[in-house]
Structures are given as structure tokens and as C-alpha cells.
Amino acid sequence: MNSISVFIKLFIGIITSKMLAVFVGPGGMAYIGNFRNFMTSLEGVSTLAFSSGVIKYIGENEGNEKELSKIITTVLITFLFLSTIIGLLLFSFSSFITTKIFGNNIQYEIIFKVVAIVLPFSVISSLFVSIINGLGKYNKLVYATIVSNIIAIILTASLIYEFKLVGALISIAVNPIILFTVNFFYVPKELQIINRIDFKEYDFVVIKKLAGFSIMILPSFLLSPYITLEIRKFLIITVGLDESGFWEAITKVSNLYLIFISTLVSLYFYPQLIKAKSKKQTKEVFLQFYKSIIPLFICCAVVIYFLRFWIVKTLFSNEFLLVSDLFLWQIIGDFFKICGTIIAFQFLAKRIIVPYIIFEFSANVFLYFFSIYCIELVGIQGVLIAQAAEHCLYLIVITIYFRKLIF
């Protein structure tokens, strides 16, 4: 079922990439990249980066109805309150935010007003996904994802065709409400999420437990998109708007061929790491990942590299042919990224807070300054070289940190 969901996502990704290439061009892709970075940071702030913690504690208390009620009620009320406040601020300062993300293109202000309105629905949807994931109802989550993706592509295609770049931005803003609607009506009766909500069960102890995850993940949730946004701004100034759109295009390609792995890690491997009670069990999860995922990625990467010209023409247009020159460093970077992903999830699974924050902060700072240096040296290729170097160094550092567990 996950494979079917991934193929649907791939198909949707191909359609949206082609439409964006035709209707908004490389420059529009750069603006879309800026907006996605903003949305990632907004999601982190409005959910306090609780998602990983919710999955962990829901999974650990699956058989404890009282504790489940406490967790679900506490997180729901917190999310609703916080998202409402942030939504009001976002609506009020939409003009200022527009200038920060899109420069003088004030016509995009309406986008942020739409985001402000749908934000509460977005965070509740995120909570539903975390609950279903924590309870291990993977099939239910995959079904809901398939249905919401099909609805989303119909809406996205219509908006892009009708309103070009504005339509693309609005579709990104409203897609969370589609997932919320599908999840709300699709949440199976056996999960009994609605029945587990009891406002008397609100408990600050739950917030305190989840705060550890917030402290761990929120800085990265905010810093990483901000660093990416600043690098893209530097690219626009240094090499041009269209060229910075090429970086967004190769990132889109990367996201498409990594869908299967990223979905599998979040749906399966991360919950397995949470449940692992000993070093031996944790090591078995690592070995299972490397034995099954890495050989598959290497095979796919070789095929993707040799088909890169065809992929660019299929996903985008002749206007994007220069993107084919970016594949090698992107694939190298993705290889190191995947190798480090499963190890890095151990920080979250076992709540290893301080080292995680230090490593994430250092990695982002290194990425920014090395990207600036490489861009000035070799142009747009520089940002891909910097990403590959950052992922490689990160892998080395966390491997050394977990050396006793891994070896």
C-alpha cells in the first residue's frame, strides 16, 4: 500500500512539476521555493515540533486509555490555541511578511491571509497523522494519504492553470485543509480519537514531556528553512532569479525519488527505533535499513543519473535543461543524507537533546557559509557541492558519536 501511495505521489509530482515549468518558469520556481521554506518554519512553530514526540508517547501508551486521552486532549488544545494566535498575527502582518519572502511583489499578500485562515486545520491534521502513526495504523494512514493526494492534484492543477504562480502558491497554502478533511472523515472508528478527547484531561506534564522534542527539533525547523531562504536570496543576487529556480527544480527531483525512503523511515523505521529497548534491537533496525534501502538507492541513483536529460524534459521543459548538470552533486549529497538519516533518528527516538541541537546548528551554519563560498567560486553548482559536503560531514560526526552502538 505504501508503494501504491508513493507511485501516486510520484505521478502527482510529475504533473505539478510539468505544470509549474510551463506556467510559472524557473523564476516562479524560485518564489515557490521561498514560500515552501516559510511554510516549513510556520509548521514547526505552530505545532511546536511536537509531532515526533506525539508519535513516541502515543506508541508507548497504546494500551493505556487514560494516558492516551491526556496526550490527545493536551496536544489538541495547545495546537488550536497556538495556531489561532499565530494565524491572527500572520493575517495582521501579511504585508510585511510578503515583502520579506517575495520582495516588492505585494500582490502575493493574499497568499498569507489564506495561510492564516487554514492554519488551525493544518495543525489538527498534523496531530491526526501523528496519532495514527503512533498507534501503528500504517494502512489507515496510507489510505488517507492516497485519497488526499488525488483530491489535492485536481485542485492544484486547476489553480495553476487558472492563476499561474498565484494559483500554485494558493494550492500549497490550502493543501493541508484537504488532508485535514480526509483524515477527519477517514479516521477509523477503532482509533476513537474523538472519544478520547476530554477537556478535563488537559495536563501540563504532557507538555513538559513533549517540550524536550520541541527544544530538539524546533531550532532546526526554524534555522534550516531560514538558511535555505538566505542561500536562495544570495543565488538570486549572484547568479539570477532563473538560475536559483534551477536549484528548486533539482530539489524537486530529489524529493520525488526520495519519497519512498522518507515515507518508509517515518512510517516504519522511526517507530521501530522508538520500540527498540536494547542496543541489539537498535542495531538490528540500523542493519535492516542499510541492507534494504542503501542498495536500492544506489541502483536507482545510477539509473536516474543516466536518464537525467530525459527526466528534466519530462518533469520540466527545455527551459530547464541546465538542471541536468546539477544531478551528480545532488545524488552524491542525497547518498550521504540517506546514510545519516536512520542514525540521526536515534536522537529523536531516545531524546538525546543537547548533542542533536549542537550537530544540527553546526551543520546549518557550515552549509550557509560554505554555500556562499562555493557559489562565488563556481556558481549554482556551488550550493550542491556545499550540500553534499554538509551531509558527508554530518554522517561522519554522528557515526563517531554512535560508534559503540553501530559497531
Image (cartoon, grey):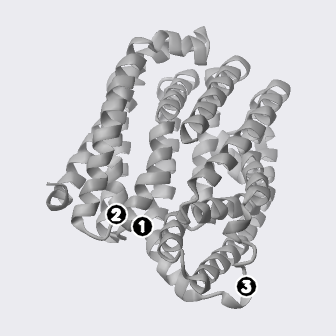
Task: Locate the C terminus and report the quarter of the image it occupies.
Answer: bottom left
Residue drawn 26% across and 48% down? 287
Q: Is residue 105 visible?
A: no
Query: Picture coordinates of residue 238 (x, y %)?
Result: 47, 27
92 vs 86, nearest the viewer = 86
Question: Disc 3 or 2, which lies upstream in sequence?
Answer: 3
Question: Disc 2 or 1, which lies upstream in sequence?
Answer: 1
Q: Are marks 3 and 1 in contact (CB under 8 Å)?
A: no
Above or below: residue 332 compared with residue 353: above
Q: Nearer the viewer, mark 2 or mark 1?
A: 2
- Secondary structure type for disc 2: helix
Query: Picture coordinates of residue 30 (x, y %)?
Result: 59, 31
Can you identify the residue that label 3 sits on? 198
Can you identify the residue that label 1 sits on? 216
Above or below: residue 111 compared with residue 121: above
Q: How many marks?
A: 3
Can you identify the residue that label 2 sits on? 347
Q: Is residue 244 visible?
A: yes
**Residue 340, disc:** none
Residue drawn 67% across and 79% down? 73
